[in-house]
Image (cartoon, rainbow, N blue to C red):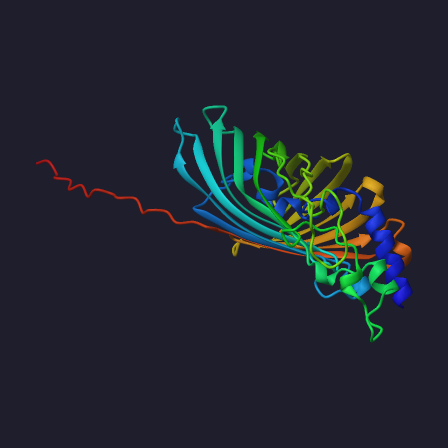
């Protein structure tokens, strides 16, 4: 059983020399608007939108205890009218933490963003939105949780693993790095007719390319403390994301929303296609049921069914990755799961109506 897990980990890390090993990654990408495109900030009708998404991966395969997990929380709001009557400004805050592996390699970030929604026509049927976000990001690693060849070849007197014998390749800052992060994006949203609307967008993440290296530039000796070395100058690569969403109303009960996402980072590409349907379950209580299927094309990685529901301004979603790549020989088609939710708060001031007294004429 241990050999099976080891083979799976080796195969997984070899195959995950792709985008999702370098940056955060969600199958339900439309349920995480600020990690998809900063121009999505404030792109809704309401007062405040609050949401979160959680992804866990490989737990059913290698029995890890939260070694691969990605939680994210966000809030955004359209706050003020823009330079013109139909324009508006949105602001938002997003936080995420991506943990991978037994060494606890963790990528965290907290970012504040803003967007400007520019109406392209007098009726407000088309909008061009520009958004950006700025914040602090960091990576952490627990050196004590790592195991290397030297520690097994030179065991302790009691025969245990000798952490003092391993080669120290981590930097002197206890395997951590922090940097300032800048993201930007643009979207075009338009109502094509009474039954169809669309949205296309482009975003770039890590524009400033902060330094995130955890490895020393000159290696090091054993003993757990680097001497005579300096932190590496590795810069995090920029990530480009292209998205498209089309909402089509088939009839009064059924709507479909095909979408796509393409992203690339350090030469690693990912293409995802989705088709999500929405069925009006109870019109009086404003309840919709959502269902669909997604497929990650790159490498034939996974097929993921999606289920969800909308009750008024509350929306929830579930997804499960069915692994169909070459890893399925050890994964038994089991991959990752996601749960997501968002809620739009609507607070409107009641209209002030001045009472008028009509005096009849005689």
Outermost residue toward the top in this view: 121
**Residue depicted at x 85% and y 48%:** 14
- From the top left corner, tell me how far across and down residue 249 is, in percent: 63, 39
Outermost residue toward the front in this view: 228
Question: Along the line of sight, which residue is nearer the eye, 132 or 235?
Answer: 235
- From the top left corner, tell me how far across and down residue 167 is, in percent: 79, 55
Quarter of the picture containing the N terminus is bottom right
Q: Quadrant of residue 246?
A: top right
Q: Is residue 96 left or right of residue 167?
A: left
* In the depicted structure, whether residue 269 falls above or below residue 5: above
Q: Is residue 207 left or right of residue 158?
A: left
Question: Along the line of sight, which residue is nearer the eye, 231 or 25?
Answer: 231
**Residue depicted at x 15% and y 42%:** 357
- From the top left corner, tell me how far across and down residue 107 is, in percent: 64, 50
- From the top left corner, tell me how far across and down residue 89 is, in percent: 44, 35
**Looking at the image, can residue 282 be seen?**
no
Question: Along the line of sight, which residue is nearer the eye, 262 or 304?
Answer: 262
**Residue depicted at x 53% and y 34%:** 131
* In the depicted structure, whether residue 165 falls above or below residue 32: below
């Amino acid at each position: 059983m241990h050999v099976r897990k080891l083979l799976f980990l080796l195969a997984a890390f070899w195959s995950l020399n792709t985008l999702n090993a370098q940056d955060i990654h969600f199958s339900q990408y439309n349920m995480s608007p600020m990690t998809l495109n900063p121009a999505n900030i404030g792109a809704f009708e309401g007062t405040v939108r609050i949401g979160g998404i959680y992804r866990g991966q490989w737990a059913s395969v290698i029995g890890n205890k939260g070694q691969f997990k990605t939680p994210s929380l966000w809030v955004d709001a359209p706050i003020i009218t823009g330079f013109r009557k139909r324009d508006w400004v949105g602001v938002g805050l997003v936080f995420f933490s991506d943990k991978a592996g037994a060494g606890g390699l963790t990528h965290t970030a907290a970012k504040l963003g803003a967007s400007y929604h520019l109406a392209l026509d007098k009726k407000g049927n088309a909008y061009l939105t520009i958004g950006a976000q700025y914040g602090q990001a960091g990576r952490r690693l627990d050196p004590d949780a790592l195991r290397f060849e030297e520690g097994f070849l030179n065991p302790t007197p009691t025969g245990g693993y000798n952490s003092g014998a391993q080669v120290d390749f981590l930097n002197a800052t206890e395997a951590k790095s922090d940097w300032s992060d800048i993201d930007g994006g643009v979207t075009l949203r338009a109502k094509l007719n009474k039954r169809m609307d669309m949205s296309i967008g482009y975003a770039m993440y890590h524009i400033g390319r902060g330094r995130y290296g955890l490895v020393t530039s000159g290696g090091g000796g054993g003993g757990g403390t680097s001497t005579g070395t300096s932190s590496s100058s590795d810069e995090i690569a920029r990530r480009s994301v292209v998205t498209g969403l089309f909402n089509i109303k088939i009839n009064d009960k059924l709507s479909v929303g095909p979408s796509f996402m393409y992203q690339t980072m350090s030469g690693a590409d990912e293409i995802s296609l989705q088709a999500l349907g929405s069925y009006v379950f109870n019109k009086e209580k404003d309840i919709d049921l959502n269902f669909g299927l997604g497929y990650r094309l790159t490498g034939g990685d996974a097929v993921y069914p999606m289920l969800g529901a909308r009750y008024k301004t509350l929306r929830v979603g579930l997804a499960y990755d069915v692994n169909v790549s070459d890893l399925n020989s050890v994964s038994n088609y089991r991959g990752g799961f996601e749960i997501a939710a968002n809620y739009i708060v609507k607070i409107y001031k009641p209209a002030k109506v001045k009472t008028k007294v009509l005096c009849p004429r005689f």
